[in-house]
Image: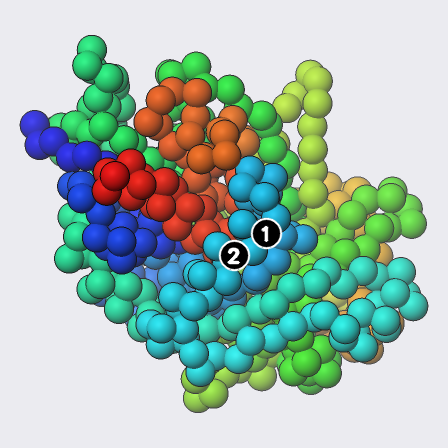
């Protein structure tokens, strides 16, 4: 059994920036990072390879798992804000959280991101226009790297970090135990055993269920979180051009008249493409965009999400979201696609109707009826939000606007941690999106830097 001082489980944004910072401070400790996915060079979706046109449910999913986590093949948007994207500021303080995210941005720039534009929604005319129509624009600075540049940056971070951190991929954790001397024993699916003094859980959203099992085993308190359910909207880029050219990522919140529910835009991808992703065998939808103009499409896509919280007698929000996604998979064999005009008229989008559609889909999906999948309340919220957005971006409510379903954002139960992101079990840390503390690339990355500095103080003292 090999002994390390520190083991990091998960090579997503939190793990990547933690390993980078440990190398940067030249920590006087042995470090191992494990991930069930592959290295960067292996992370190519079969759809992108042209092997298949629809998701074949790779295990693990190349889009969701591997070095860099789900953020690797995303559009590389880093939102520097505490207004959304997680609650890191509640643990480390607002100023410290902002400082950490600004540091993450400086690292990205030093690794090749300096040419990427930094947008801002502050003092934007869009904010005033939104308020006129009861829409609320959240403030943030946004660094958009693009999927292509993002991968290049992660390659450089990998080369930098591996000088100090051992990394092992295609490795699933089968069990974690604690020895009599207080060290942690990590057992892999290959039968390997590693021991460590400090154990860091940074598995991201795809590892949310697994982290819950670890917390149950060690009696670590957890608080149930929400699940966000909605659709991905795709429309001609010209409709949102006046917004995306100005602020790029517009986080807009609307409270519906009918139910007083909150609906929000999420992950806007100008000139991007819609993609499918596999989370624990369930196919959902997402969006990507590129920095290279030659890779641009004619469309913009973004998500519309409705948050769902549950109390007694049912409180498993993730199970609720999974059941809806499974229904979509059952009816459509994966992702369902419907024209907005068909949805509001109460009719299914057929292949015949899709052939007449002026907006050309960037993801091959099954034409169908989202009203058979998404509950009425959430669907009413989404329709009302589309009409609200049409007031600031005329054309959003066009008949040929495309809706892909379902998009589900699973959030881990919030793990109880202190200001160091340490659990009630000494030397066991939970950070990043897998902990429920963060919900974004910037905050997850910042949480990795935060814990890296804490451990550096411990081992370099």
Res. 335 visible in picture: no
**Colour scheme in use:** rainbow
Badges 2 and 1: C-beta atoms under 8 Å apart?
A: yes
Q: Residue furthest bottom?
A: 294
Residue in front for this viewpoint, 247 or 299? 247
Report x, y in % for residue 68. 34, 56
> Dividing the picture into quarters, in which one does residue 359 lie?
bottom right
Q: Is residue 181 left or right of residue 336?
A: left
Q: Residue furthest left?
A: 1
Q: What quarter of the picture does the C terminus occupy? A: top left
Query: Under tag 2, what secondary structure?
Result: helix
Q: What quarter of the picture does the N terminus occupy? A: top left
> Dividing the picture into quarters, in which one does residue 73 lie?
bottom left
Dot 2, crowdedness within 10 Å: few (<14), some or many (≥20)? some
Q: Is residue 272 left or right of residue 1?
A: right
Res. 252 visible in picture: yes
> Which residue carries the number 2 mark?
99
Report x, y in % for residue 166. 16, 48
**37 vs 265: above or below:** above
Tell me what residue is drawn at x 81 percent, y 44 percent: 261
**337 vs 290: above or below:** above
Tell me what residue is drawn at x 35 percent, y 46 percent: 453
Tell me what residue is drawn at x 70 percent, y 70 percent: 121
Q: Is residue 128 left or right of residue 367?
A: right
CA–CA distance between discs 2 and 1?
6 Å
Q: How many marks?
A: 2
**230 vs 417: above or below:** below
Residue in front for this viewpoint, 226 or 406? 226
Report x, y in % for residue 442. 50, 57
Dot 1, crowdedness within 10 Å: few (<14), some or many (≥20)? few
> Which residue carries the number 1 mark?
95
């Amino acid at each position: 059994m090999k002994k390390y001082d520190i083991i990091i489980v998960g090579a997503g944004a939190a793990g990547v920036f933690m390993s980078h910072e440990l190398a940067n401070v030249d920590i006087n400790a042995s470090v191992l990072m494990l991930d069930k996915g592959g290295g960067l060079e292996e992370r190519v979706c079969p759809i992108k390879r042209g092997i298949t046109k629809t998701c074949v449910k790779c295990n693990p999913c190349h889009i969701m798992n591997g070095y860099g986590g789900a953020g690797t093949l995303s559009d590389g948007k880093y939102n520097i804000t505490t207004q959304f994207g997680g609650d890191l500021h509640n643990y480390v303080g607002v100023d410290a959280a902002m400082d950490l995210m600004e540091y993450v941005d400086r690292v990205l720039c030093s690794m090749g991101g300096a040419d990427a534009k930094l947008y801002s929604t502050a003092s934007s005319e869009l904010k005033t226009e939104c308020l006129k129509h009861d829409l609320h624009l959240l403030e943030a600075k946004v660094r958009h790297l693009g999927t292509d540049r993002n991968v290049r940056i992660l390659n450089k971070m990998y080369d930098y970090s591996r000088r100090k951190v051992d990394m092992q991929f295609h490795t699933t954790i089968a069990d974690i135990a604690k020895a009599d001397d207080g060290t942690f024993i990590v057992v892999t699916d290959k039968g390997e055993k590693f021991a460590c003094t400090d154990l860091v859980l940074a598995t991201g959203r795809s590892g949310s269920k697994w982290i819950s099992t670890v917390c149950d085993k060690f009696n670590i308190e957890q608080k149930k979180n929400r699940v966000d359910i909605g659709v991905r909207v795709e429309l001609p880029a010209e409709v949102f051009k006046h917004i995306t050219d100005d602020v790029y990522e517009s986080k807009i919140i609307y409270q519906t008249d009918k139910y007083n529910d909150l609906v929000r835009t999420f992950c806007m991808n100008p000139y991007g493409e819609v993609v499918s992703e596999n989370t624990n065998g369930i196919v959902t939808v997402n969006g990507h965009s590129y920095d290279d103009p030659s890779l641009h499409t004619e469309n913009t896509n973004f998500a519309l999400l409705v948050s769902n919280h549950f109390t007694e007698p049912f409180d498993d929000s993730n199970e609720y979201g999974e059941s809806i996604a499974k229904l979509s998979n059952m009816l459509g064999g994966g992702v369902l696609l419907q024209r907005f005009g068909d949805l509001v008229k109460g009719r299914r989008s057929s292949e015949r109707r899709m052939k007449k559609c002026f907006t050309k889909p960037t993801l091959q999906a099954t034409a169908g009826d989202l009203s058979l999948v998404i509950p009425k309340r959430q669907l009413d919220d989404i329709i009302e939000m589309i009409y609200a957005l049409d007031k600031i971006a005329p054309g959003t409510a066009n008949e040929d606007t495309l809706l892909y379903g379902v998009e589900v954002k699973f959030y881990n139960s919030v793990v109880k941690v202190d200001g160091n992101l340490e659990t009630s079990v000494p030397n066991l840390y939970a950070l990043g999106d897998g902990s429920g503390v963060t919900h974004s690339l910037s905050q997850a990355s910042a949480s990795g830097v935060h814990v890296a500095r804490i451990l550096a103080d411990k081992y370099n003292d």
